[in-house]
Amino acid sequence: MCLRVCQLVCLSVDHNSEPCKTAESIEILSERQSRSLARGHLPASFKAFITPTASKPGMDTTDVSSYRPISNLPVLSKLMKYFVVRQLMDYLQSSDLLPANQSGFRPGHSTETAVLWVLSDILLAVDREDVAALILLNISAAFDTVDYDILLQRLQTTYDISDVAHRWFRSYLLGRSQYVRIGTSCSSVIDLICDVPQGSVLGPVLFILYTAGLNSLIESHGLTPHLYADDTQVYGSCPAANVHAYSVELTVVVCDDETPAPAAEVSTAYRQDPQ
């Protein structure tokens, strides 16, 4: 464990630093990170304040909805989160626990793989002369609404993360705060009661584990899901004679009480007419 931490630290060390000081810094950091993981506790100094910043260039800066919270992480905290993500992803991949139809935040996956997957399935349905329907779901403020208790329970029951490792994730999630900063003015600090940190390497991985259960919900209605981060594609096909019944089923999926309240946009249905 210490060796891997040292390798990560060496990548960020100033090459002009004195060798003895560099070695001493690496040793201290390695020992501190190892102690944190062994005790299942993340030091408070490694938990960042979160200051909202404009989400996209050109958006109305007077509109509150134009802003999203971004974690300002200390450098040492980023190194630790990177190490934890490496360990977590190795475990999830070796145990085949990652959702196969999630293309976000995973090595070898991208928006390109998501598009190819969905488009290929829809074109196959069209080739069978079926009606193909696609629903695009987007969860508003998705990262900001992650429930700590549900996430921690899911890590333990679904992914078998327990004991010291589970305590570390609990420590990572709980006890964080945020404030709003505009210029040199700052608001009062408030404690966070939900979310996973945006701007961190660990937050997105925890998010895809949190939303993995959405797949089984969609599949229980006889439809196919594919996710990219917080964007969900729900699609399927049916013979032309069953279009009305199929559209009712699609509506049931969007309005399912167990589905996180998304803003849904229903696409046009495509069908290849018999020649």
Image: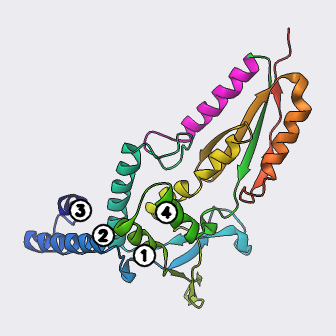
From the viewer's side, name the closer residue of 14 and 217.
Answer: 217
Q: Residues within 10 Å of mark 2 (few under 14, many from 20)?
A: some
- Classify mark 3: helix, strand or loop: helix
With 252 as the anchor, is 3 left or right in this view?
Answer: left
Q: Quadrant of residue 59?
A: bottom right
Q: Earlier in the sequence, mark 3 or mark 2?
A: 3
- Classify mark 2: helix, strand or loop: helix
**Residue drawn at point x = 15 percent, y = 71 percent:** 27
Residue linked to disc 4:
203
Any mark on residue 37, and which? Answer: 2
Q: In front: mark 1 or mark 4?
A: 1
Q: Residues within 10 Å of mark 1 (few under 14, many from 20)?
A: some
Q: Earlier in the sequence, mark 1 or mark 3?
A: 3
Q: Amino acid at mark 3?
A: Val
Magenta part of the protein: which range? 107-127
Q: Alpha carbon of mark 4 to alpha carbon of mark 3: how far?
A: 20 Å
Q: Residues within 10 Å of mark 4 (few under 14, many from 20)?
A: some
Which quarter shows the C terminus?
A: top right
**Residue drawn at point x = 91 percent, y = 33 percent:** 244
Instruction: Estimate the x, y position of residue 237 in percent, counting from the top left.
Output: 77, 28
Q: Amino acid at mark 1?
A: Ser
Q: Quadrant of residue 70?
A: bottom right
Residue linked to disc 1:
171
Q: Amino acid at mark 4?
A: Gly
Q: Earlier in the sequence, mark 2 or mark 4?
A: 2
